[in-house]
Image (tube, rainbow, N blue to C red):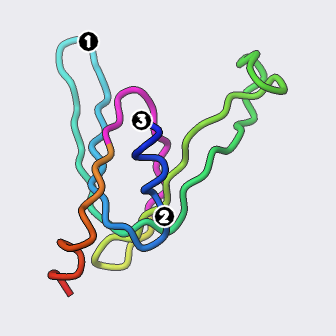
Amino acid sequence: MDESIRKQLTPGARVTVTQQIPHRDYTWTDEMHGTVVSYQQKQTGSWFAHSKNDKLWLDRLSIRKADGELLTLNLDEYSSVSVEPAEVVAEAK
């Protein structure tokens, strides 16, 4: 993920996250909209990752949808995050 987007993932920011899961014959795509609750890099319990401290570090984004549902998303190379400009958020209120 681009560093400029990471810096914008602050609590209260409105985002659209598109995630894709590739299959052999097709790609499953899902799009989520919500408000950032938190963004952090957390390690997994993966024993085979052989990365920093022998753990695999993942970008985790928690967002709250308009209906109040809380989602925790693991962001990978098949994920796309776009942050809505602040003026668009202000107009929506």
Residue at x 78%, y 23% (from the top left corner): 47
What is the C-alpha distance between the residues marked 2 and 3?
A: 15 Å
Instruction: Give the numbered dot on residue 2.
Output: 3
In the image, taking residue 69 as reference, residue 26 lies left or right, namely: left
- Residue 52, position in %: x, y? 78, 25
Please state which amino acid type lies under the numbered disc 1: Arg
Crowd tier of the residue under label 3, counting other residues whose Cα lies within 10 Å: few below 14, some 14–19, many 20 or above: few
Q: Main secondary structure of the magenta part?
A: strand
Instruction: Give the numbered dot on residue 82.
Output: none
Please state which amino acid type lies under the numbered disc 3: Asp
Instruction: Give the numbered dot on residue 10.
Output: 2
- Residue 70, position in %: x, y? 44, 68
Say what secondary structure mark 3 lies in.
loop
Q: Quadrant of the N terminus?
A: top left
Query: Of label 2 and label 3, which has the lower sequence position?
Result: 3
**Which residue is under mark 1?**
24
What is the C-alpha distance between the residues marked 2 and 1?
A: 36 Å
- Tell me the magenta residue range: 71-80
In the image, taking residue 28 as reference, residue 6 lies left or right, namely: right
Query: Of label 1 and label 3, which has the lower sequence position?
Result: 3
Residue at x 23%, y 49% (from the top left corner): 31
Please state which amino acid type lies under the numbered disc 2: Thr
- Residue 42, position in %: x, y? 68, 44
Q: Give the image quarter of residue 30.
A: top left
- Residue 73, position in %: x, y? 46, 49
Q: Nearer the viewer, residue 91 or 16?
A: 91
Q: Are marks 2 and 1 in contact (CB under 8 Å)?
A: no
Viewer-nearest of discs 2 and 1: 2
What is the C-alpha distance between the residues marked 1 and 3?
A: 28 Å
Residue at x 21%, y 87% (from the top left corner): 93
In the image, taking residue 57 as reference, residue 67 lies left or right, namely: left
Residue at x 26%, y 12% (from the top left corner): 24
